[in-house]
Amino acid sequence: MRASNLLPVLALILALPRIACAAAPDIPLVKTALDAIPAREWALASSSQVLGEVLSQTNMAGLRALAEAGDPRAEQLVGFALIESAPTDPERAAAFAWLRKSAYQGNARAEYNLGYYHADGLDPASKSAAAMKWYRTAAGQGFAAAQELLGRAYDQGDCVRRDAAEGLRLCRLAADQGYFDGESCVGDHEAKGLGTARDGAAALVWYRKAAAQGDTHAQIGIGNLYHDGNGVPHDDYEAMRWFRTAADQGDDVGETFVGWMYDNGYGAPTDRAMAASWYRKAADQHNAQAEDHLAFDYMNGSGVPKNYTEAMQMFRAALRDGEVDAAVSIGYLYSEGLGVPTNQIASVSWLKLAADHGVALGAYGLGVHYMNGTGVTRDPVAAMRFYRAAIAGGSFDAAVNIGHLYKEGDGVPRDYVAAMHWYRLSADHGNPVGAEGVALLYACGMGIVADPVQARQWMQKAADGGDRNAKTWLVTYPTGAPCIACTDQAKPGEMVDR
């Protein structure tokens, strides 16, 4: 549910005792106000909008009196008003009692409210299964908001079996009523190929319908279509225009995208300071990705003065707001003593948190700690296990260190053929240190016939990738490929940030 213009409504709600005393209930007036609301508005408008319209013509005392007389519309609105202003569980329980009275009379909006508040954990007896039951009931009556949320649940496999085709069907039912969230949902399916063939042009049609109603999610969706060239010609200037449209409405995701566009010079000249300012706007709304971006800006001095203490604070904020990858950066800062005293044990703890949540670089960092014996007892076997987990998660830089372990016979029998395999895997994914490892094995004939030509070719790849050791090697040995390793080539794994 997207509440809109809640503040003036809640101001009236919070003044309930004074209103009840000052104004006599006028049930006929309230009933007239409710009867005057068009059917389309009952179906599509938010409860805050409906409540605001009713209270603009009458008073809360009259609405409460009509609810006590058993009118399901009034029961729903009183329950909604109370739940939005109820700070304690007993008060929430009273609010839910009103919503249930309305729902048991078949009021679809109350059924939707119950599903939403169950899913959001506000109901003291909240259960996900109960949320789905109420959503299904409201959706079965054609309530668009319930159809859209149930469709999203099928997309995500949230309390139901994942079924994108069913998600699309339900969102389409909501969209066909002109409900903007439903239109955005259909646009998402078409843009991403969820439950249907990917069709950016069709997505654009649906996104435009929702965007015309001011839906920022759809506006961002259009921006992504233009940035990706999905169903439309690639046009970063048009993408920026749509991201900015959402951002100018205060949408934190839109603000993050605008910052990202300035960061990368898409649709506007690269402007790190401007990027940081947009990230700050979104971070102030607790957008985890914006907080993460801003943390990197502080760490690297990009668009803001370099400040490791501020970077640490922003990474912690990002983690609190759901960006679990930020735990890797926190671990890195503790390991390097940047913005905080060096603390390898703390570094291990934060990296473990990331790894336990499936973050590949968290597993890689743990491998480094176990390989070097920092913050933990040195254990190359454990290091190997974490490196393999990192590779399984897509962090192929870890393959370099597995190559080191096999090359040195550290925790595993020395095996140059295996070392070549892991160095090559890393090099094939763009790691220059992996390419250097391949070059030295060719130069020394370790696990393979010595081949000076291959050695120089691989060393050149490493140098082209920015490996300083490789550049030094090529300058020192302008011809041939002697079996001499740079002194720090085989250095055990080093901590890396994302």
Image (tube, rainbow, N blue to C red):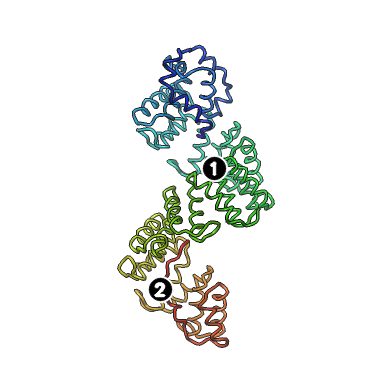
Residue sitting at x 55%, y 38%: 169
Question: Which disc is residue 492 wearing?
Answer: 2
Give residue 283's position: percent from left, percent from top: 50, 48
Does 312 sit left or right of 37 as displayed?
Answer: left
Report which residue position mark 1 lands on.
165
Closer to the camera: disc 2 or disc 1?
A: 2
Give residue 449's position: percent from left, percent from top: 49, 85
Crowd tier of the residue under label 1, counting other residues whose Cα lies within 10 Å: few below 14, some 14–19, many 20 or above:
some
Q: Classify 293 as above or below 155.
A: below
Residue type, mark 2 in image: Pro
Q: Nearer the viewer, residue 238 or 22?
A: 22
Residue sitting at x 57%, y 18%: 36
Cα distance in 3D space between marks 2 and 1: 49 Å
Crowd tier of the residue under label 2, counting other residues whose Cα lies within 10 Å: few below 14, some 14–19, many 20 or above:
some
| Residue farthest toward the front in the current orientation of the protein | 305
Question: Which disc is residue 290 wearing?
Answer: none
Q: Classify 477 as above or below 264.
A: below
Give residue 231's position: percent from left, percent from top: 66, 49
Residue type, mark 1 in image: Ala
Determine whether label 2 and label 1 are within 8 Å by CB: no
Residue sitting at x 51%, y 54%: 293
- Choose the circle earlier in sequence order: 2 or 1: 1
Label 2 sits on a secondary structure element that is: loop
Q: Nearer the viewer, residue 309 or 390?
A: 309
